[in-house]
Amino acid sequence: MEEEWIAGKHSVTEALRSGRTINKIWIADTAQKHLTQPIISEAKKLGIVIQHVDKRKLDQTVPGIQHQG
């Protein structure tokens, strides 16, 4: 199975709501907590792993994509 990346808080939120299979959500350490909390709460309910990472790791992993933290 091919790996697919979803970037951006709205896209990730929609993927969670749609019941899509998600293996892990990466959130930048510098992301604003009030914006990421709804994603974290929903992911925890669904048993999805949340990993807080350095923003540079996101930049390197998905170059050229506006991930919004």
Image (cartoon, grey):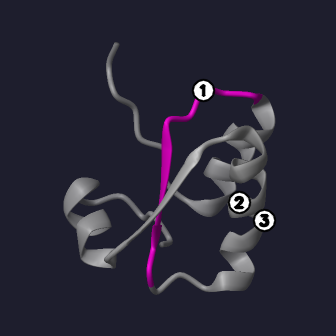
Residue 41 against residue 31 in the figure, above or below? above
Q: In which quarter of the image is the N terminus?
A: top left
Q: What element carries label 3?
A: helix
Rendered image: mark on residue 21:
1
27 in magenta = yes
Q: Which amino acid does label 3 sit on?
A: Pro
Q: Name the residue under label 2.
A: 39
Badge 2 vs badge 3, beta-carbon distance below 8 Å: yes
Q: Residue reaching furthest top?
A: 1
Residue 7 against residue 46 in the figure, above or below? below
What residue is rendered at 44% in x and 81% in y?
29
- Residue 44 or residue 13, whichever sits in front: 44
Q: Where is residue 25 in the image (x, y as percent from the top left)?
A: 51, 52
Badge 1 vs badge 2, beta-carbon distance below 8 Å: no
Q: Spatial distance from mark 1 to mark 2, Cα to Cα?
A: 15 Å
Task: Please state if 14 lies on the left or on the right of 24 as rendered.
Answer: right
Q: Which amino acid does label 2 sit on?
A: Ile
Residue 9's quadrant in the figure?
bottom right
What segment is highlighted magenta in the picture?
19-29
- Residue 52 or residue 36, whichever sits in front: 52
Task: Please state if 49 lies on the left or on the right of 55 as rendered.
Answer: right
What residue is rendered at 56% in x and 34% in y?
22
Q: Name the residue under label 3.
A: 38
What residue is rendered at 71% in x and 60% in y?
39
Q: Which amino acid does label 1 sit on?
A: Thr
